[in-house]
Image (cartoon, helix red, strand yellow):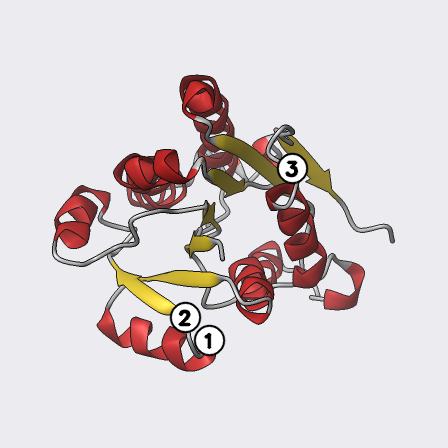
Amino acid sequence: MATHVITGAGSGIGAAVAERLTKRGDEVWLWARDAGRARELEALFPGARTLVGDLAEPDRLSWALGHQSPPDRVDSLVHSAGVVDLGSVGELSTKVWHSTLTTNLIAPAELTRLLLPQLRAAGGHVVFINSGAGLHAYPEWGAYAASKHGLRALADALRGEEAANGVRVTTVYPGRTATPMQEKVHRQEGRDYEPERWLTTADVATTVLTALDLPRGAEVTDLTVRPTG
């Protein structure tokens, strides 16, 4: 039975991945920002276990993990948590830049660092849920795209560094996906939200599991998935 650690499992893509892995009987550890959220996740996913730490404060993640008992082996670490705030470079405050880069880039880097011993022990797999914004930056998307371009660089560097330790690294670049975050983006854009036009979270979860389930001799480095409509 494989062991997975997932961030962002409260909704959207992270929740869809957690549901699929839980249903097939794998051991799932869900990352929660606080104890209250941990209880909510445990209720949503019976049998899942939780780890607590605020991704908005990555400097404290080491302390947080040190006061808990994470699994000894991690077969996959799926980074799905993220934040988005649109705005032009001429308008975005340093507060938005800091919060976006901290949650979307620095926290995944730090959490990966902290769990590398368990990933190495299992010959595990790190999956970064990126975005089309990690490949192309558009007007009003500067802070978010910068964080996702950085996440791509993090994945590429990690892959080269950890290949000798048997750790695989995959970046998934979903197009627009019907999630609460996408609904927020549409509000910021001033557009009507039509979820039926976009990818489903199940579509992206299938993409993630395809990468995870490849035989050990193969590795998908980058996967782009787009809605067909």
Q: Secondary structure at mark 1?
A: loop
Q: Amino acid at mark 2?
A: Ala
Q: CA distance from mark 1 to mark 3?
A: 27 Å
Nearer-N-terminus badge (1/3): 1
Residue 141 position within the rendered picture, expressed as x and y whole percent measured from the top left: 54, 39
Left or right: 5 in relation to 141: left
Task: Please give left or right for residue 224 compared with residue 28 in the image.
Answer: right
- Disc 2 to disc 1: CB gap under 8 Å: yes
Numbered label attached to residue 48:
2
Q: CA distance from mark 2 to mark 1?
A: 6 Å
Describe the element under mark 2 as helix, strand or loop: loop
Any part of residue 106 in sight: no
**Residue at 41% across, 24% down:** 165
Q: Nearer the viewer, residue 52 or 137?
A: 52
CA neighbours of label 3 inside 10 A, class few (<14), some (14 to 19), many (20+): few
Which residue in the protein does label 1 denote? 45
